[in-house]
Amino acid sequence: MSPSRSAAAERIEKLREEIREHDYAYYVLNRPRISDEAYDRLLKELQTLEETHPELIAADSPTRRVGSDLTKTFPTVRHSEPMMSLSNTYSEEELLDFDRRVRELLEGERYAYVCELKFDGVAISLIYENGRLVRGVTRGDGEQGEDITNNLRTIRSIPLSFKPPGKEFDRIEVRGEALMFRDDFLKMNARRAEAGEALFANPRNSTAGTLKLQDPREVAARPLKFFAYYVRALGGKSRWKTHEEGLQELERLRFPVMAVHRVCQTVADVMRFCKEWEEKRDSLPFDIDGAVVKVNDLRQQQNLGATARAPRWAIAFKFKARQAVTAVRAISLQVGRTGVVSPVAELEPVFLAGSTISRVTLHNEDFINEKDVRAGDMVVIEKGGDVIPKIVSVVPDKRPANSKKYRFPSTCPVCRSPIEKAAGESAWRCENIGCDAQVKKRIEHYSSRHAMDIENLGEAVVAQLVDAGLIHDAGDLYFLKAEMLLELERMGKKSVENLLTAIERSKSQPLERLIYALGIRFVGEEGAKDLARDFKTLAALMQAGEDELVAVEGIGERTAHTIVHFFQNPGNRKVIKKLIDAGVNTKAASGHRPTVEAVFKGKTFVLTGTLPSLTRPEATRLIEDRGGRVSGSVSKKTDFVLAGEEAGSKLDKAKSLGVKIIDEATFLKMLGNR
Ligand code: IVH
């Protein structure tokens, strides 16, 4: 080894050791020893050294926690010993039963228990070989789980390596729970709400979802934590003889072990531990749903054995969900930024598990009907594993005599336009793009990169313009004047000019972008392209009926229905009129289409039935490229009905009106150039 290289190797090892110390102090002991800046400097130095000496990179280096490889599917791995579940008990009697069984099976031996918290997270198994983390697996069905090593490596409190203090540590399995602290979870959800992303129901779901992400960099950005509660030597005997000693070994190896655990000599002590933590659970930074009681001695554990699904030496004492009874003052409706109309129960404020609750979601119409919740009812609310309280049931005896069943309204509580419920969905939605509740989100979408791509008009500026009352919908953008904008904060001459230029430029965006920008539900970029290609103008699209829309490749019945309703909505029509008045392009570009003679100029076609070789969009294009028009219904003004197999009522109508009917062969001949 060259001197410079051996010096580097030494320095690298020293840095790694130091950084591991700091990680341990920060993530496991919660007692940081240096400032973030000093820590970053160490990490940076290590990174630089490893870059210049790539041959010295090691998998357990603190720089290697977060990989960049995406995992599409996680391989399935069999656990060397099944990860069993625990039997649950819900009362003191059941706990006494458990203790009686243990006593009988141990035939008079003395025994003790260890009581722990039952973390409400996701169980994980970690395999270490020669002191290095080689595999991390989810519990799965207990027999086999998914290999999520790369994601687990990003959890900073999980050691990537340790110095094996003896032979029995050469191959070990550590089990424990991955979870999120409530505060971290709430902050993360708030950020997601801000970004318009789906919210997680509780820290557990959020942990489970995070562990299955494909990109470890995303996992690293989420606040996952870990607590170890089990260690096993895979290569034979271990020197720890009790569960308690196992936890101590884990602590020595620098695994995070929850400080709250207690050795109890009697079942009465066990009961005290359970009661105590049932009361104090809200003082913990994370959710627990009970306590776990384990026979301490490992040999006794072995002798007690297990049933098919759970060990006989351990049991979970489940805490009761925290409940309260209170009155529903009213049922109100909220319109979300995407138009979803959600019912909310306004409650007589009541204190439950650490916070005062005055509103609780009623989810949707189906939920209200199922529980039959009415204004004036007394309801039981509960905070279970979820941070979010929910309505469990109505107290029927307390219902006021004059109470009336709740009827879901048919109009939006904010803008009064009719609301819609798509087939197969439970949510009612307001589809009016001018609706106050949705204004900002809609305009942001209109302006976004894949829509009208208006530079400088992001979330902050949209909010500023809406809040100042300058715009109410996308149409208003085109009527903004420099004088109005200059009044606003942070709007200098240059930025106003840039913004107005960007808005002006958006007028000539292609039709497909405009269609996408309108934000019709279920119409994504692809759908917008299909619609623009087949209808050619916004006016034609607005007049299209459901069957014409369904005929477009890529447009299904649900989307067709939504499109028709979208354009019927008076609020939406008003916005579109503004766009047209402003001079926004509403026609498909015709430049790059093949130049053919306008042999169908002024002619109207109606398509019906299935043609032998052409699809409907193809036939439509052939007609329109030649100056013709395709209409959805037959009238006296129709020039030709192009009919295929199984043509229906349109064909009959054509016959009765004496409209000329042609087949595909004739049509192709008429094209002239085929
Ligand atoms: S010991 C057979 N200890 O409970 C021993 N489990 O129902 C089972 N859990 O999937 C594991 N906190 O996710 C153990 N302190 C704790 C626990 C705990 C939570 C979970 C674990 C497991 C489930 C079993």
Image (spheres, rainbow, N blue to C red):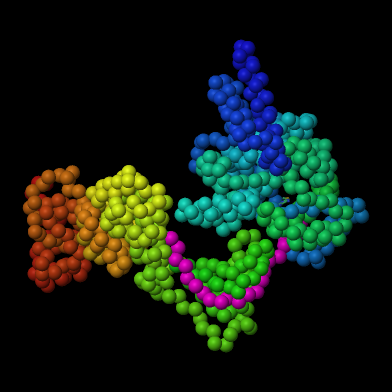
| Identity of the residue drawn at 57% across and 76% down | 328
Q: Quadrant of residue 517?
A: bottom left
Going by the picture, which residue comes out furthest to the bottom? 401
Q: Is residue 621 left or right of residue 132?
A: left
- Main structural element of the magenta stretch: helix, strand or loop? strand
Q: Is residue 107 left or right of residue 321?
A: right
**Rendered view: 239 above or below 357:** above
In percent of width and height, residue 613 lies at 20, 52
| Identity of the residue drawn at 46% across and 78% down | 407
Can residue 14 be seen by looking at this rendering?
A: yes
The verdict on residue 326 being magenta is: yes
In percent of width and height, residue 262 lies at 82, 51
Q: Is residue 183 left or right of residue 576?
A: right
Residue range (magenta):
314-337
Number of numbered discs present? 0
In percent of width and height, residue 49 lies at 58, 23
Position of the N terminus by quadrant: top right
Q: Quadrant of residue 151?
A: top right
Can residue 419 be seen by looking at this rendering?
A: no
Which is more toward the observer, 210 or 16?
A: 16
Which is more toward the observer, 302 or 297?
A: 297
| Identity of the residue drawn at 65% across and 21% down | 11
**Rendered view: 139 above or below 170:** below
In percent of width and height, residue 648 lies at 21, 67
Going by the picture, which residue comes out furthest to the top? 2
Which is more toward the observer, 637 or 521?
A: 521
The verdict on residue 72 being magenta is: no
| Identity of the residue drawn at 44% across and 66% down | 335
